[in-house]
Image (tube, rainbow, N blue to C red):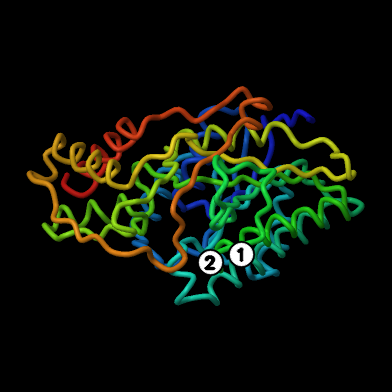
Amino acid sequence: MTNVDLNNKTIFITGVSGFIGSNLAMKLFNTLEGIKIIGIDNMNDYYDVKLKESRLEALERDPNFLFIQGNIADKETIDTIFNTYKPHIVVNLAAQAGVRYSITNPEAYIESNLIGFFNILEAVRHSYDAGNTPVEHLVYASSSSVYGSNKKVPYSTEDKVDNPVSLYAATKKSNELMAHAYSKLYDIPTTGLRFFTVYGPAGRPDMAYFGFTNKLVAGQKIQIFNYGDMYRDFTYIDDIVKGIALVLQKSPELTEDNVKYKIYNIGNNQPESLMYFVETLETCLMEEGIIDKVAEKELLPMQQGDVYQTFADVDDLTRDFGFKPSTSLEEGLRKFAKWYREYYMG
């Protein structure tokens, strides 16, 4: 692997007001010297924009942060950013997220996840033209969703992943294929990261733990799919951003087929049952005085696009970076509950 010195560099982060993007930017500012971060986000209303604005407010306290409201699917916007700010490192985290939403709003996924990523790849490619500042490393978000209904566990990056069960998953697998092609054609070092069920304070309200909490607070019953017989490799946000920060600092060497391309899983390597997850969440919320009783549960069949379990094999990540996510579900949900009480209840 090739070491990439991030100090005193310009880093371009797409989806910067998002859950992962904002936390990554904050971590980089706290651990690196002399960096400038250019961030872009379209600030859409897929979930509460106020949450995105509060994340941005924290970032904008640093004078070396510049925010641009725009859409990565707009080629002119992306080209202008690259021509003006000449980023050394690019982190593509902008995407239309959500498995279930992709069934009802497929156009949003094609625009952001395919056209948007294509624009990023093209801009990185042209950074290698004469007179430009070449991008040293492109890191982009993939997803555990690419494993589809794979029966073999834990999920390894060596597994064949040609059976997506949602359009969202298909677009993420497409990102990996597109990155491989650009790495091969233009000698661009690219690393894709398959994230596993990311959660934590100030997370995405469309995620199960956040939605469950809102319903618990409102005294409503919560819906649990596949009758509770589901497992997820819940990964705490601090572990995710630590993993990204480490990966940014080492770009892939040429593989056997002569391409600077790598994929890693970032997951907790410890699937938890959905029922245990709900019980732990309820306990943490009661400890913080947010709720005073458990919720009524409605057990339902598996939803279209869902999978039975996710389970990350992180041996590659541990071998190459000496790092493995380790935050327990109890610790992570306790921190989420504390944040929820402070943010929503003062």
Indicate the position of residue 180 as horizontal and vertical percent values. 78, 53
Q: Is residue 172 above or below residue 104?
A: above
Q: Is residue 299 left or right of residue 49?
A: left
- Viewer can see residue 93: no
Q: Tell me the kind of residue under disc 2.
A: Ser
Q: Residue at x 63, y 31 (%)?
A: 317
Indicate the position of residue 287 as horizontal and vertical percent values. 15, 34
Q: Are marks 2 and 1 in contact (CB under 8 Å)?
A: yes
Q: Tell me the kind of residue under disc 1.
A: Ala
Estimate how packed mark 1 is, as few (under 14), some (14 to 19) or many (20 or more) residues with alpha carbons within 10 Å: many
Residue at the spot of label 2: 166
Q: Nearer the viewer, residue 330 or 187?
A: 330
Q: Is residue 182 left or right of residue 321?
A: right
- Quadrant, the N terminus: top right
Q: Is residue 270 above or below residue 219?
A: above
Indicate the position of residue 200 as horizontal and vertical percent values. 36, 41
- Quadrant, the C terminus: top left
Q: Residue furthest right?
A: 130
Estimate how packed mark 2 is, as few (under 14), some (14 to 19) or many (20 or more) residues with alpha carbons within 10 Å: many
Q: Residue furthest front?
A: 151
Q: Residue at x 40, y 46 (%)?
A: 231
In which image quadrant can residue 148 be found?
bottom right
Q: Is residue 340 left or right of residue 38?
A: left
Q: Nearer the viewer, residue 244 or 275?
A: 275
- Total marks shown come to 2
In which image quadrant can residue 109 be found?
bottom right
Residue at the spot of label 1: 170
Q: Residue at x 67, y 60 (%)?
A: 162
Q: Which mark is residue 248?
A: none
